[in-house]
Image (cartoon, rainbow, N blue to C red):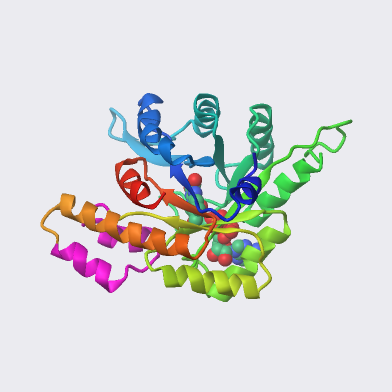
Amino acid sequence: MKVTEHIKKANGNTQFSFEMLPPLKGQHIQSIFDNIDPLMEFKPPFIDVTYHREEYVYKELENGLLKKQVVKKRPGTVGICAAIQNKYGVDAIPHILCGGFTKEDTENFLIDLDFLGINNVMALRGDAVKTETYFRSEKEGHSYASELVSQITELNQGKYLDDALKNSSETDFCVGVAAYPEKHAEAPSLDSDIHFLKKKIKNGAQYIVTQMFFDNQKYFDFLDKCRKEGITVPIIPGLKPIATKKQLNLIPHRFHVDLPEDLVINVVKCKDNNDVRQVGIEWCIEQSKALQKAGIPILHYYSMGKSDNIQAVASKVF
Ligand code: FAD
């Protein structure tokens, strides 16, 4: 079922969903099931699976020279989605990127999803590879998520890259896109970011999932701004419980979000990461309850591959 249909069916109740990372290459798929199993009691209507593009590493050769090598540390997004749908009977949502994909790769990826009965997809640009400062698309690829959304919309209309195809079948993807209540790092202003968010909706995206935030007011202000700009699709909030002291620096640096002073003070006071975990869980429970009270249809949790703290939050909220 599509995300938009899940929201309609919930009839105003707040639902629980979450995002999983594919296991590191070399690990068994059981490692992802072990993290999903404890969360199934909260009846997620869907589970997202992230996509991880290639990285470049330099390997030292016997002669001392360095060889640039492409590696994919977390492959398997499509296979994991199929396995989740098969094992749990829950919709799995693969993330798909512009980065590292030509239009042809994208089309083939979408054909696989369609054949597997996966009909939700989260369309993203992706970040620059670690060795580059700015995002660079493939020569025959998309530069922005809005272009990727257009390609998916065209496939939904039966328009494939090879326009000589006869009687081509239409796909039926429900497309989600990302948004940033505290602005995307590269956007010159929030208004500019929302302008391009509108473009993703105009090109066919049907729902939005936000970057994590730790101050609900940032989400409510963003929601308000989007509605005033005429964006009417569901805007699903993304939440993450802080789990380690290190994340006080890592999260603002990597995700370009602010941490509220009270949260920072409480984390700093903790004597170890067990205490931090508890502070993070309690903060996230409060955020979740307030969003639930405001009638937000779905709360989406970033697991970062570990489910125990999400389970602790969900058990108090759902
Ligand atoms: P876009 O919507 O393309 O926007 C990127 C930037 O370009 C923004 O600053 C925007 O304002 C600007 N912009 C857009 N269109 C134009 C235009 N036409 N002209 C000029 N500027 C423009 N990354 C992964 O690698 N894998 C994942 O699985 C993944 N999942 C994610 C899930 C969620 C919910 C979120 C919020 C992020 C996720 N990301 C993931 C990270 C994401 O790929 C990065 O944040 C990336 O930098 C931006 O992606 P986007 O789809 O928002 O890009």
Position of residue 301 measured from the top left corner of the image (x, y, whole percent): 42, 50
Q: Quadrant of ligand 1?
A: bottom right
In the picture, measured across the screen, residue 228 lies left or right of residue 317, that is right
* Residue furthest out toward the left: 271
In the picture, measured across the screen, residue 116 lies left or right of residue 53, that is right
Near-viewer residue (128 or 65): 128
Near-viewer residue (317 or 169): 317
Near-viewer residue (215 or 78): 215
Residue 268 part of the magenta-drawn span: yes
Q: Residue at x 78, y 39 (%)?
A: 161
Total tally of numbered discs in the picture = 0
Position of residue 44 measured from the top left corner of the image (x, y, whole percent): 49, 41
In the picture, measured across the screen, residue 180 lies left or right of residue 65, that is right
What secondary structure is the magenta-colored segment mainly?
A: helix
Quadrant of the rendered image containing residue 6: top right
In the picture, measured across the screen, residue 245 lies left or right of residue 129, that is left
> In this rendering, is residue 158 above or below 218?
above
Res 127 seen here: no
> In this rendering, is residue 161 above or below 145?
above
Tell me the quarter of the image containing the N terminus: top right
Q: Residue at x 48, y 39 (%)?
A: 43
Residue 18 part of the magenta-drawn span: no
Res 162 seen here: yes
Which span of residues is magenta-colored?
A: 243-269
Q: Residue at x 34, y 62 (%)?
A: 286
Position of residue 8 measured from the top left corner of the image (x, y, whole percent): 64, 51
Position of residue 215 measured from the top left corner of the image (x, y, whole percent): 38, 68
